[in-house]
Image: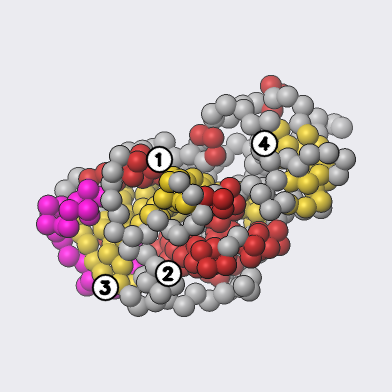
Amino acid sequence: MPDTRAFDLSYRAVLVLSDRPSRLSELVPAGGWSAVRVDSLASDDQDLWRALGTGDRLWHGAGVDPGPSGFWSRVLVVTEAAASQFDTLREQLAHGLRLAGPTACVALSGQAFHGQRGRTWLAAPGNLHLSVALPEPGLQARDARSLAMLPALALVDAVRGMSDGGLRPGIKWVNDVLLEGRKIGGALAATQLQSDRVHALFLGIGLNVETTPPVAPTPFVPAVGSLAEAGTRVTLSDALTCVLAALGERVDELVEEGPASLLDAYRKASLVIGREVCVFEEPGLGETPLASLPAPIRGTVRGIADDLSLILDGVEAPVSAGRLAFAEACRPPGS
C-alpha cells in the first residue's frame, strides 16, 4: 500500500445524524439535510442518538460514504459531548445497544476526553475528536493485540493523503502521531471478545486540525502541533472524511490479509526504530511526574515484534508495555 493516496470516495450513502449540520459540508451535500424528531427514526437509531446525541434538536441527511465500498453505516456529530464518546460506545454496546453497522461519532467539543490510561486529551475548537464502533468486524481474537496499531496507522495515512504527501507524520510507540517532532494526534483501541472472535472493535482518534492546544511539555510529549500550524489548510470536515476513508481501508486490509501488511506499514511509519529511548513503567490513571516513576528501561530500538513489543539493544526480553520517551527528553537538566 503506497504512503501517499488520494482516497476514492464511494457514493453509497451513509446516514448522518447531527445537531450541527453546518460543519459537515464534505459529507452531506447542500440541501441534503432534513430536521426530524428523534422518535421518527428507526428504533436502533433512536437508541444511538439518545445514548450519544444531545437533546431533541436533530437533523439527518444521506451523506457520501468516504469508506471503501460503502463501509460506514452511521456518522453521528454533536456540538458538545457530556462524556467521552469512546467510553460511552463501549458501555452502551456492552449493555445491549445495537448498531446498524460501522458507526463513527464525532464531538466538536466536550468534557472528559482522554487518551491512554485516562490521560487528559484537551478538546480545542476545530479539532477532530472521533470515536468508532465496529460490530462484528470479522477478526479473530488472536489478532486483538495488534489492533492497537490500526488507528494510528490510519491517521498517518489520512494526514499524508489530505496533504497530497506534503506532510510526513510518523508514529511514536505505541500510538502517538508526530509531525516534525510535535504531537498532532493520538489513538485508542479496545475490543469486546466473544469466544475466539472480536465481537466489537472500538477506535478513538484525536487529531489537531485547526488549533494547537495549550499543553505543557513533558518528556513524553515535549511539544504539540496541528495541521494548521504545519501550513496545511484543511477543514474539520475534510479531516473527518479522510480519516474515515483511511480507517475503512485499513480495517478492510486487516480483515482480508491479516495483520502482516499493517505491521510492515507500522514499522515503516515508526519514529522509534534506531532511536535511543527510555520506557517507563506505566503509572496509574492520569499523569504522574517523571521523578516519581521507577527507573526506566533504556536502550536503542532495533525492531518492533509482531505483538508490537520493542526489541532493545542490551535488553534481554522484548518490552511490551510502558510509556516511551526519547532518551534526549529524559536526561536530567545539564547532563
Magenta range: 23-49
> Residue 169, how many percent across, how many down?
64, 60
Q: Earlier in the sequence, mark 1 or mark 3?
A: 3
> Residue 109, how many percent across, how many down?
38, 46
Under circle 2, the secondary element is loop
**Where is mark 2, residue-wise?**
67
Under circle 1, the secondary element is helix
Q: Whole-Å distance between the Cαs marked 1 and 4?
A: 22 Å
Q: Is residue 281 magenta?
A: no
Discs 4, 2 touching: Cβ within 8 Å: no
**Nearer-the-camera pick, 45 or 212:** 45
Q: Whole-Å distance between the Cαs marked 4 and 2?
A: 33 Å
Q: What residue type is labelled 3?
A: Ala
Closer to the eye: label 4 or 3: 4
Q: Can residue 215 be seen in this view?
A: yes
Q: Looking at the rendered structure, which numbered label has been put on residue 30?
A: 3
Closer to the eye: label 1 or 3: 1
Closer to the eye: label 2 or 3: 2
118 versus 143 height, above or below: above
The residue located at (49%, 74%) in the rendering is 7
Q: Which residue lies furthest to the front in this view?
A: 195
